[in-house]
Each structure stands twice: as structure tokens, then as C-alpha cells.
Image (cartoon, helix red, strand yellow):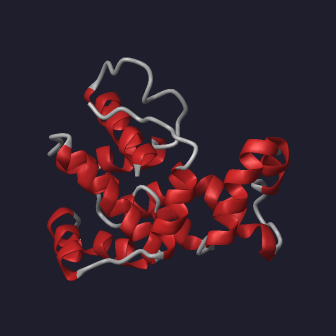
Amino acid sequence: MLQATVAPWYRVKQFFQAVTARVTPEDLAVVDRHLPPAARALFRRQTRADRRHALAVYRLLRRAGHDDPHLLAAALLHDVGKSVARVPLVYRVAWVLLGRCCPRLLDSLSRGDHPPAWRRPFVAHARHPEIGAEQARQAGCSPLTVALIRRHHEPGADTSPPETDEARLLAALQAADNLS
């Protein structure tokens, strides 16, 4: 099982990976093997940094011995809900910083059904698991893949002992997401 360890330089590394992200034809072949056609279009709609991140999560799971097709599909699409607002990198940095120093402000910025344009990326970021799960459902992904996407930011799922297959797969997805 993957174990998430958090180092202080983690976010700096993540920032530079986002800036230098590349997605190769070989990467897209992996996507084509694991996703139904409509879901492939969802994957391609993500930012290059999100596609790179999704592929990194996928690879971490594969290296850890995971081969469940629902889990691997969820790895490739777990952040697809962010694509509805094209959450720019500056908002992602702000999200992390506000989450650490001003969580109540971040919570306030992330609410609302019709926020002003400058707040939409915060709202999309906060709701991306449910948005992405619905997009994956509509694209023909399995109910288990949809559930994993919907739950991938649930607190504690990667620290409590998994009691069901879904819980075990969710813990693996969260650990890989935290490491990439």
C-alpha cells in the first residue's frame, strides 16, 4: 500500500512540475487503454498540468501493484472537475496558502452557486470531486470509478483501515494523489 509522506518542499516540487508538464503520445495511449471514448475527451480537456498529475497518480498506483481498472480510470480523471473553470496555477497556489493560513477565508471564497468571475476558480476547486464524478458518470465510467472520483478528497479515508474494496481503492488513490 502507498504511504503518503509530506515534506515541506512538496508544494514547491508540485509547482515546478506543473510549470514544466508534458504529456506524450505514449501517455495518451495509456489513457486510451483505460478510459471509454467520452472519458478520453474529459481527460484531454484538463490542463496540461492536471493531465501530467493524473498520469503521475496512475503510474504511482501501477508501481505499487494496483491493476484495478476502476481505480486506474479514477486516477486519470480524479481532478477533471477542475476543468469547468480552468483553475489557473495562481489560484492553486492561493488555495494552498489560504488553506494553511486563512482556512475560513478560503471556505468563504469557495462557496456560492453564482460567484463573481474572480471567485469561480475557488468554487470549482472546492467542488471538483462532485463535478468530476458527474462528468465521469455522463462519460460512461463505472459506478465505482465515479464513487472514487467523488470521494477522493474525503478526509481520513487514507488513514483508517479499509474495510471494503471501495475503501481500499480510495485509500490507494488518496495516497498516490498525495504523493504526486
The quadrant holding residue 167 is top left
Whole-percent x, y for residue 66 in the image: 18, 42
The one nearer the camera, 42 or 113, is 42
The quadrant holding residue 58 is bottom left
Whole-percent x, y for residue 65 in the image: 15, 40
Horizontal side of residue 27 vs 104, given as left or right = left
Q: How many marks?
A: 0
Residue 130 shows in the view:
no
The one nearer the camera, 40 or 88, is 88
Residue for point 37% across, 50% down = 146
Which quadrant would the N terminus be assigned to in this image? top left
Residue for point 31% across, 33% down = 166
Residue 163 shows in the view:
yes
Whole-percent x, y for residue 121 in the image: 68, 67
Whole-percent x, y for residue 78 in the image: 41, 55
The one nearer the camera, 19 or 115, is 19
Q: Is residue 179 above or below residue 140?
A: above
Q: Is residue 90 above or below residue 98?
A: below
Toward the front, the furthest residue is 9
Residue for point 19% across, 62% down = 34
Horizontal side of residue 125 vs 133, given as left or right = right
Residue for point 75% across, 61% down = 113
Horizontal side of residue 130 vs 114, given as left or right = left
The quadrant holding residue 148 is top left
